[in-house]
Amino acid sequence: MSILETRDVSIAFGDRILLSDVSINANAGEVLGLIGPNGAGKSTLLSAISGDLPVRSGSISVNGLDPTTATPLELARARSVMLQDVSVSFSFLVRDVVAMGRRPWARTPRAQKDEALIDAALRATEVDHLAERDIMTLSGGERARVALSRVLAQQTPVVLLDEPTAALDIGHQEQALGLARGMARAGAAVVVVLHDLNAAGAYCDRIACLAGGGVAAQGTVEEVYTKEILSDVYGWPIEVLHPHPDQIQVVPERGMGRRISAAASELLDLIHT
């Protein structure tokens, strides 16, 4: 069942069109991966879905809510968001940051599980030993895990994750994506922005590939991950291998980076003269 849907969504900043006629959907119980080159509009789309960015045209439905008209409390109970930027400007204890995810459920029957869910979320991302630390003293990777803990504790039917693995080491990357799959198994619709195509292929049920402010392709991993589609979207020769029947591996052609552009050659000449 689709509980997240965008229909012909267009977003502009002044006269610049950022997204044009984007239609995607995410179903309860699945992980939808958003992939695409830098500047394709992935984070912009997530911001619009979360209700933080207005749309020029089209419509968005998040668990039956229109983000442009829903109240902040309604949205906080419908979707949780992990931003790409996990930097902080104020001092909070780590446990208090995770507890913020429970605030939408204050004075409701769900509040009875607050303490148990906060503790469980801290343990799930392996930051329970940091619970009494000031979040401003943590590394970028530790702050990212705390941000994911808050999302876990929020307990929403739609989960939006913008590059959740960007600051993480390889072990915690796998852990974070495993938790995303776990949230989907629990019934959530999870939308995750990823640049690691192999990770997206391993953990996502379906893929929406954005390019140039529009949807270049969407469907199952097998449908989107073709040599032709990925090479065209990323502007680089990409091979798609199948080392095992249930595994897809994306391999960019190596060595082409040595063929530098005229602009890069000019820069290097200036540096070395």
Image (cartoon, grey):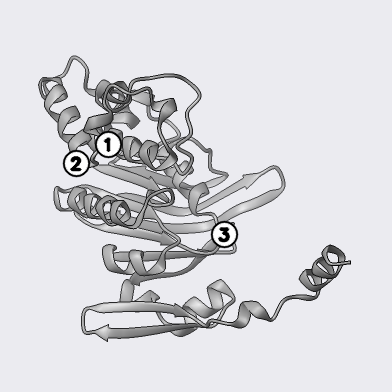
Judged by depth in the image, the label closer to the viewer, 1 or 3, is 1
Relative depth, front residue between 108 and 245: 245
Under mark 2, the amino acid is Ala
Identify whether 16 is placed above or below 118.
Answer: below
The local secondary structure at tag 1 comes to: helix
Q: Amino acid at mark 3?
A: Asn
Q: Position of residue 146 (x, y in %)?
A: 32, 35
Q: Which label lies toward us, 3 or 2?
A: 2
Residue depicted at x 34% and y 31%: 75
Write down the quadrant of residue 242 in the picture. Answer: bottom left
Q: Earlier in the sequence, mark 3 or mark 2?
A: 3
> Which tag, 2 or 1, sits closer to the chain's start?
2
Residue on which disc 1 sits:
149
What SS does tag 2 mark? helix
Residue 78: x and y, percent?
28, 35
Residue at mark 3: 38
Asked whether disc 2 touches disc 1, contact meaning CB atoms under 8 Å apart, the reply is: yes
55 sits to left or right of 4? right
Label 3 SS = loop
Residue drawn at x 80%, y 75% is: 262
Q: Residue furthest top?
A: 107
Residue count near mark 2 (Cα–Cα under 10 Å), binned few <14, some 14–19, many ≥20: some
Above or below, 271 against 166 in this view is below
Q: Which residue is mark 2?
A: 124
Q: Quadrant of the N terminus?
A: bottom left
Q: Mark 1 belongs to which amino acid? A: Ser
Looking at the image, which is closer to me, 206 or 182? 182
Alpha carbon separation for disc pair 1 and 3: 27 Å
Distance between the Cα atoms at labels 2 and 1? 8 Å
